[in-house]
């Protein structure tokens, strides 16, 4: 087992400037506290919509994936899913649904680059994003919205993208199957106090959506083997 430190990042929603600042803070912290230990970034989805620079967020994540000095995992969120459906499905309902949920700001971010729509490279990248990432060594599940404790790890993708189930939000109701002993890291639902949330005793569910696009912070959780979970917010 190779020791590594995982930095999981919550919903960005077009806040490219905050994302770059958070990456800088992560890399600075890692260089000071964990020199020589491998670093992994896990972005939890919802990179686009509502904020000012969705195109810039996707560009940043594609560039990170190309680097060989860090490992990057990018997950799909429900807003990426809405964008795919807006372009892939016949008829106007899916497109209207996306535009009403912030897709117009995404289109505007590409228009400022002289493009009518996201380019094929970006659409293909979004299409290939997974909805779940499992760290088997540390028994941590990373997902955009959440999981179904009854069917984990074989939940339907729509659960990963959309769930706000009370059963999922209460870790005391998890130990009924394969989720026993696992921790889950997610975003999707902004926390009420704009701070990262740790739920359970001991903490097993971590919500990292701290409302960056609503004037809140962009947050990351720091998951290091054998260490308490810490948070970084910008």
Image (tube, rainbow, N blue to C red):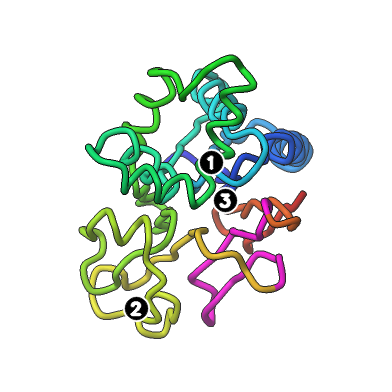
Q: Secondary structure at mark 2?
A: loop
Task: Please name the residue shown 36% across and 44% down the image.
Answer: 81
Residue 15 screen position, x and y as percent: 67, 41
Q: Is 221 inside the magenta-drawn segment?
A: no
The kind of secondary structure the magenta stretch mainly shows is: loop
- On screen, residue 27 versus residue 104, left or right, reads right
Task: Please name the residue shown 46% across and 38% down the image.
Answer: 74
Q: Are marks 3 and 2 in contact (CB under 8 Å)?
A: no
- On screen, residue 230 versus residue 73, left or right, reads right
Distance (Cα) linking label 1 and label 3: 6 Å
* Circle on res. 47: 1
Q: Nearer the viewer, residue 8 or 227?
A: 8
Image height check: is 222 above or below 65? Answer: below
Distance (Cα) linking label 2 and label 1: 28 Å
Image height check: is 147 above or below 44? Answer: below
| Residue most extreme to the front | 92
Distance (Cα) linking label 3 and label 2: 24 Å
Image height check: is 136 above or below 51? Answer: below
Task: Please name the residue shown 54% across and 40% down the image.
Answer: 104
| Residue most extreme to the bottom | 172
Q: Which residues are magenta?
A: 193-213
* Circle on res. 11: 3
Q: Secondary structure at mark 3?
A: loop
Residue 124 screen position, x and y as percent: 35, 24
Residue 187 screen position, x and y as percent: 52, 58
In this rendering, the label closer to the viewer, 3 or 2: 3
Q: Quadrant of residue 88?
A: top left
């Amino acid at each position: 087992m190779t020791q590594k430190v995982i930095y999981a990042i919550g919903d960005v929603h077009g806040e490219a400037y905050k994302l770059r600042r958070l990456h800088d803070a992560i890399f600075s912290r890692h260089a000071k506290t964990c020199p020589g230990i491998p670093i992994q970034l896990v972005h939890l989805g919802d990179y686009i919509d509502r904020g000012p620079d969705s195109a810039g967020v996707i560009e940043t994540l594609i560039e990170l994936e190309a680097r060989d000095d860090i490992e990057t995992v990018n997950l799909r969120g429900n807003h990426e899913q809405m964008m795919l459906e807006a372009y892939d499905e016949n008829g106007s309902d899916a497109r209207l649904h996306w535009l009403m949920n912030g897709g117009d700001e995404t289109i505007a971010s590409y228009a400022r680059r002289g493009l009518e729509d996201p380019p094929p490279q970006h659409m293909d990248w979004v299409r290939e994003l997974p909805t779940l990432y499992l760290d088997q060594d540390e028994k941590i599940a990373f997902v955009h919205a959440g999981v179904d404790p009854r069917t984990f790890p074989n939940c339907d993708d729509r659960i990963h993208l959309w769930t706000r189930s009370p059963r999922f939000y209460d870790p005391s109701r998890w130990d009924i199957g394969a989720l026993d002993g696992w921790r889950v890291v997610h975003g999707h639902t902004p926390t009420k106090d704009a701070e990262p949330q740790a739920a359970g005793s001991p903490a097993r569910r971590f919500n990292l959506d701290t409302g960056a696009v609503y004037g809140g912070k962009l947050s990351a959780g720091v998951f290091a083997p054998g260490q308490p979970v810490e948070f970084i917010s910008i």
